[in-house]
Image (cartoon, rainbow, N blue to C red):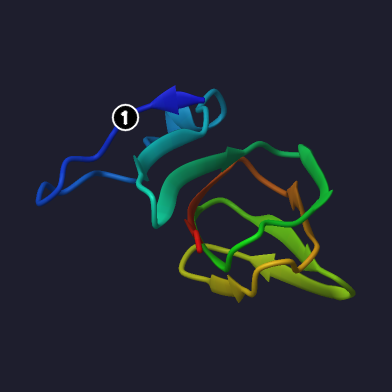
Amino acid sequence: MGLIRAEAGEATRLLLPESELAEAKTTCLVKTDNFEAMRMCVHANQEIPPHKTEGPLTVQCLQGNVIFKVGEITNDLKPGDWLYLEGGQMHSLKGVKDSALLLTILFS
C-alpha cells in the first residue's frame, strides 16, 4: 500500500489521472486511534473476497465502477455513489473498471 499521508487542514487530491488509474495502488490518507481513511484502488476484474471489519465503514466511488456485495445485496457503485456498512457486515468487491474508492473505517 502506498503512503500519502494527508496533513490536517490541507486539501488532498483524491482523483487520479485516467492514465494512472490502471497502475494505481491503494494509499492510506489518515490513520488515527479513531478512524482510517484510504483511497482504495480496485482494478478491472480484481476480486476482493468476502470479509468484514469490526467498526462501521463508508465507501464512496470516486472513479470507475465496482460491484460491492453486502450479504445478498449487490450494489453497482459508480462515481458519486456512497455506501454505509455497520461493523461486522460481510462484504466483497469486484472491479468492473479500474476504480478509485474513498474508504473510511471507524474504530471503537
Q: What residue is rendered at 38% in x and 50% in y? A: 33
Name the residue type under label 1.
Answer: Ile
Task: Give the residue at the far right of this rendering.
Answer: 72
Q: Nearer the viewer, residue 104 or 98?
A: 104
Left or right: 38 as drawn, with respect to 42 = left
Q: Nearer the viewer, residue 83 or 100?
A: 83
Q: What residue is rendered at 41% in x and 50% in y? A: 37
Left or right: 1 as drawn, with respect to 6 = right
* Mark 1: secondary structure: loop
Quadrant hosting residue 49:
top right
Q: How many marks do you count on the picture?
A: 1
Crowding around mark 1 (Cα neighbors within 10 Å: few <14, some 14 to 19, many 20+) is: some
Question: Does residue 22 lie above or below 107 as drawn?
Answer: above
Residue 57 percent location from the top left of the image: 55, 65
Name the residue carrying label 1: 4
Residue 20 percent location from the top left of the image: 45, 27
